[in-house]
Amino acid sequence: MAEICKTSLPGVLEIFPKVFNDQRGYFFESFRADWLEKENVFETWVQDNQSYSQKGTVRGLHFQREPFAQAKLVRVIQGKVLDVVVDLRKDSETFGSYYSTIMDTEKHNLLYVPKGFAHGFSVLEDAIFVYKCSNYYDKESEGGILWNDPSLQIDWMVNDPIISEKDTKWQSLEEFKVTSEGGL
């Protein structure tokens, strides 16, 4: 069985699966629907994504707008990342707040990210990152918040980050709040 931990952002869950180690290595269940169902989360996962990133890379902060909004279940299968989610839910008491956690191949932890959050990560060791999505990617529904928006004060724990051109051009949280009429 896994340990499910609520975070400082309502709806965001960190999951620590039971890992069985022996002289051969380890075994664990990386996903079970009943883990989330016990927390009243019922998702149908329709897409799996995988990325490889070099140490020092920052990806994000990304989200999908309705009707293609996505919940995500993320984990690291090799390496180490700092995973970050920002609450963009309209009228949320924690709008603009973020939660971050280290995800790696020692803890084997997962993070459940509901719809309405921007998501990103920085790579602390070369990493393979995988995640399930509850909806299909749609380019026209894609959005983002500037990764280094000073109002967020996120310590990405990397120097001289490697960032895509697209991720340097997202809007600030304040601009997003105006253009989205208060959030997702």
Image: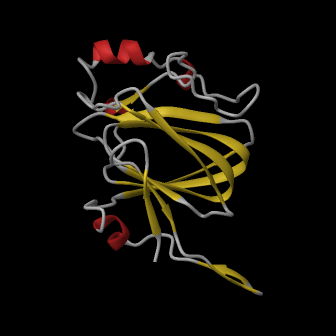
Q: Quadrant of residue 77?
A: bottom right
Question: In the drawing, does residue 69 fall left or right of residue 165?
Answer: left
In the figure, 108 relative to 20: above or below?
Answer: above
Q: How many marks?
A: 0
Q: Quadrant of residue 162?
A: top right
The residue sitting at 56% across, 22% down in the picture is 153
Q: Of residues 52 and 127, which is closer to you in this image?
A: 127
Residue 97 at x, y percent in the picture: 43, 30
The residue sitting at 28% across, 59% down in the picture is 41
Q: How is the image coloured?
A: secondary structure
In the figure, 184 relative to 114: above or below?
Answer: above
Residue 182 at x, y percent in the picture: 25, 20
Q: Of residues 8 and 129, which is closer to you in this image?
A: 8
Q: Quadrant of residue 57?
A: top right
Task: Give the quarter of the figure containing the C terminus.
Answer: top left
Question: In the drawing, does residue 62 fall left or right of residue 125?
Answer: left
The residue sitting at 29% across, 41% down in the picture is 69
Q: Of residues 130 and 15, which is closer to you in this image?
A: 15
In the figure, 165 relative to 129: above or below?
Answer: above
Question: In the drawing, does residue 32 fall left or right of residue 141?
Answer: right
The residue sitting at 37% across, 69% down in the picture is 35
Residue 146 at x, y percent in the picture: 51, 21
Q: Residue furthest bottom?
A: 23
Q: Of residues 100 and 165, which is closer to you in this image?
A: 100
